[in-house]
Amino acid sequence: MRLRPASWQWLLRHELRLVWRNVGGARLTILIVLGGLLWLALHYVIWLLLRVVGDPASLPPGTYLLAGSTLWVVFTLMLSQAILLSVNTFFDRGDLDLVLSSPLPPRNVFIVRGLGVAVAATSLYALLLTPFAHVGLVTGKLRLLAVYPALAALGLLAAAIGMGSTIALVRLLGARRARTAAQLLGALVGAAFFLVIQVNNVVSHERTARWMISLWKAAREDGPLGPASPLWLPFDAMLGQPLALAALVAVGTGSFLLVVASMARRFLDGTQESVTTPAPRQTDAAIAAARFHGSPWRVVLVKEWKLIGRDPQLIANTLLQMLYLLPMMFVWAGQTSAETVMLPALVFAASTLAGGMVWLTVAAEDAPELLAAAPVETGLLSRAKLVAALLPIWILLSPVPMFLLASRPLAALLFAFCLAGSTISVGVVQLAMPQRGSRRDMRRRAKGNAAGGVMELVTMAGWAALTWCLLRAPVYAALAAVPAVAGPLTAWLFGGARRRAFAGG
Amino acid sequence: MPEAALVIEGLVKRFGASNAVDGLALTIPQGEFHALLGPNGAGKTTTLRIVAGLLRADAGRVSVLGHDVTTDGLAAKRVLAFLPDDPLVYAKLDAIEYLEFVAGLWRLDPAVAAARAEELLRWLELWPQARQRAEGYSRGMRQKLALAGALIHEPKVLILDEPLTGLDAAAARQVKDLLIERVRRGGTVILTTHILEMAERLAERISIIQRGRIVAQGSLDELRAQAERGGGGGTLEDVFLQLTAAPA
């Protein structure tokens, strides 16, 4: 279909094309095929499910608690996605200047970008939920067609909240800080779901059981979480209850339009202000006396740590990884025997982190030409960068061996050895098979460096296995040490060409 | 006779099947302001990157003030500064932190480096923003900061690839004055530029590169002669177009 240039439909198509291409390259075909097969299979599963459930209009009360809360989890994930997409669409893509300098009404731009966010945030869940509508259509449960408008309304609501939060942060913190804060917010919203489902590991089984009984009681017909609870309005809407559906569509569409109408101009002003306002001038007194440090080793360490410390997204991601390990820690605290699982898992997590950090300091160096032109041995720079990347991880995990030292000194020593060994080995793989990248591509760092990625994985798995063997079955330790050592060694032996290319040969 | 600032002999650099630099030879004495001109893809940047130690040559020899860049690379780098056409500075570091880092790489005495950093930042009018991170700088400010980084260790040979890119008229004037001052104090400046007027006004000698070789070299008058214009009225632009239009 040929769309009129500069119309909102034309803009929306452009928006969706960018979102779609962001999924990327060869993966796209695989995703389409696998996604399509999964989607078809889901139709069959849902057909079976609806046969068991019967009439969706008269579900047992407990279903509302289960399905309704699942829907809220889905919405939370959509919201997390919407916040991250808002950041991408308004800050990262960098085409705002181009679009805003064109003779298009800014409000249209904002509406279309918002719709793009809504569609992208909803698409994965549409794959899971739309089969209900199709099966409903075939089996005569026509009210299930309401899944479509209800899902769209949830998508618009998520986009509205996502964009609203981003806009509020822009007004509050300025564009640059807002970008980081919004990314943090999105990640935290996503992590919240994970942490909630880990409650079971944190509190005792008896207490969890008591909570479950109370919840189940509350979900009875006349209970506060029963089918009549307003909390289940989105679920009611999906089931095709007219009032609930109308309310959800009104809330979703209304909040979306409200955000667009009231805040589009403010957002654009806020962004442009922060981009174009010159940096304030400082007085001499405000400029602290410079304290320079001498040696290349020291300046490299200081520089790398400053860059890491000033990257809130990196810190947030690192802390989130640690946050994910917390429930395991609680399990471990309750059961000493769990350390044979816990310690190898920590070694694996630490080496994953090390891979990312070494990649950041070595491959994602912002000014490689400056370093290459400096009269400093490459080896010295590499060693300094390795230490700069690994030391924070060692410090972060140092409480673990210290905690173990009193009760299990051997386990503490073994853990410290494997932690150091795994992180250094992964660092060596990175140095042996380097591939230039940019800091913002950290999550996709393995792209284009499959061999390095495989070597890294082999090394990490080898060290995790070695940790387990040393703790539980030392007789197999030599066997586990093979991949732990073979990873960096192979990378070094076969990475010569990569190293030469990296050094500018 | 003093050591030449830069000697290049039979330099070859291949990228795949094509020769980006093809037997290039060039000698630049100390204290000279030398401009390297050539059409896009002629091999200027590749040559300069080999001189700065960022690329390895496939054949030939390059020495900076007598230090061979292949066998004695660190010594050559100590007396050299290279400013690429799009220099990257660390967005999350402020100007002082950036200069501290660069000074550390060249192992400067911290007290000397701190004083030099202040002098350069004041001179380039970056001092009021010295404690702001470079992510808030304009392109011109980043370019000036990179230039300060290139100058902090007082290089004897300064190589600049398109140094005026992104600078406003006032900043461009500042940079030109600075380069002239460095040559006056005995330093050597080698630059590539597409602004022929700049080369015409500043450079004592000009080399024109085409297809990886020097096709003409000399003062503006000598180039005019080589271009068979006989010294009358032709601008560098005329000479450049005539010399680069001829088959190499």
Image: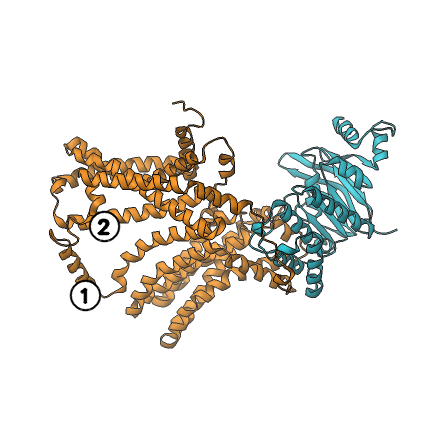
**Residue B228 image offset from top left, x and y in percent:** 85, 27
The orange-tinted chain is: A
The cyan-tinted chain is: B
Amino acid at dot 2: Ser
**Residue A258 image offset from top left, x and y in percent:** 35, 41
Q: Residues within 10 Å of mark 2 (few under 14, many from 20)?
A: some
Residue displayed at 12% across by 53% down: A220
Residue A118 shows in the view: yes
Residue A486 shows in the view: no
Which one is nearer the viewer's eye here, B42 or A56? Answer: A56
Which one is nearer the viewer's eye here, A237 or A261? Answer: A261
**Horizontal side, residue A495 vs residue A81: left or right:** right
Which one is nearer the viewer's eye here, B58 or A277? Answer: A277
Helix, strand or loop at label 1? It is helix
> Within the image, what quadrant is residue B132 found in?
bottom right
Note whether A348 is above or below A92 in the view shown. below
The residue under label 2 is A69
**Residue A212 image offset from top left, x and y in percent:** 18, 59
Chain on which label 2 sits: A
The residue under label 1 is A206
Q: Which mark is residue A380?
A: none
